[in-house]
Image (tube, helix red, strand yellow):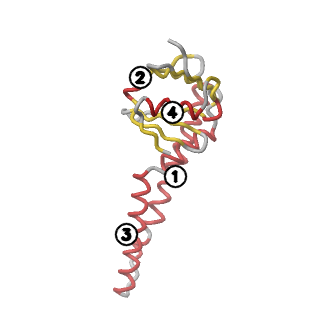
Amino acid sequence: METLFENKYTRTREIITEIYRYYYFKRRFFIFVDALIILCTLYSAVLSVLVGKFLWDNMIFLPIAFFIQFFVYFMQVNALVNRDKETHGCEPCVEMLVNDDIIAHRLGDTMSSQIDFSKIRSCITTKNLICLRTKAGLLYIFEKNSFTKGDAESFLRFLKDKGIKIIR
């Protein structure tokens, strides 16, 4: 079957950081949780003023919650960078091949996986990346400026024609 799109890039710390930055700080779930934490803290502050007693235990929760979120974010980025170094000895080369039926993903010298379009839940775009999220929660990542066959906009139209939801 003819390859319609090819994407080749090196998975650098910058790419990994962009992926996790979206995941931990721009997803609706985390935005909702962060807003809820802020609202609870504001409620606690108002309650403290009305009662006349400062409620330290409630006010300390906000910085701790945000610290945990940032800590987990940095730990995930470092874990993937270190795994790449341990497994490949360097930043691995990623190759994505797309035809009408499947997406083939190659990491380094071996074919890692293939997935058909029926298993893709959505497509998330960031500043430099196109991320396909599967029903199992896996991400297949394309760097927008690294298409060796086709281009990012054509690929997004292709995905939309396949019925995949595009989230910008």
Q: Nearer the viewer, residue 22 or 90?
A: 22
Q: Please name the amino acid that badge 4 sits on.
A: Arg
**Disc 2, SS:** strand
Q: Please name the amino acid that badge 1 sits on.
A: Phe
Q: Please name the amino acid that badge 2 sits on.
A: Asp
Q: Nearer the viewer, residue 166 or 70?
A: 166
- Residue farthest top in this picture: 1
CA gap, disc 2 and disc 3: 43 Å
In this rendering, the label closer to the viewer, 3 or 1: 3
Which circle marks residue 157 in the picture? 4
Q: Decide: few, some or many residues near mark 4? Use Cα within 10 Å; few <14, some 14-19, many ≥20.
A: few
CA gap, disc 2 and disc 1: 35 Å
Q: Earlier in the sequence, mark 2 or mark 3?
A: 3
Q: Earlier in the sequence, mark 4 or mark 3?
A: 3
Q: Quadrant of residue 89?
A: top right
How many numbered marks appear? 4
Q: Earlier in the sequence, mark 4 or mark 1?
A: 1
Tell me: 19 left or right of 38: right
In this rendering, the label closer to the viewer, 2 or 4: 4
Tell me: 136 left or right of 24: left
Q: Earlier in the sequence, mark 2 or mark 4?
A: 2
**Disc 1, SS:** helix
Residue holding disc 1: 71
Q: Quadrant of residue 32?
A: bottom left
CA gap, disc 3 and disc 1: 22 Å
Q: Identify which residue is drawn at 57% across, 35% down.
A: 153
In this rendering, the label closer to the viewer, 4 or 1: 4
Residue holding disc 3: 40
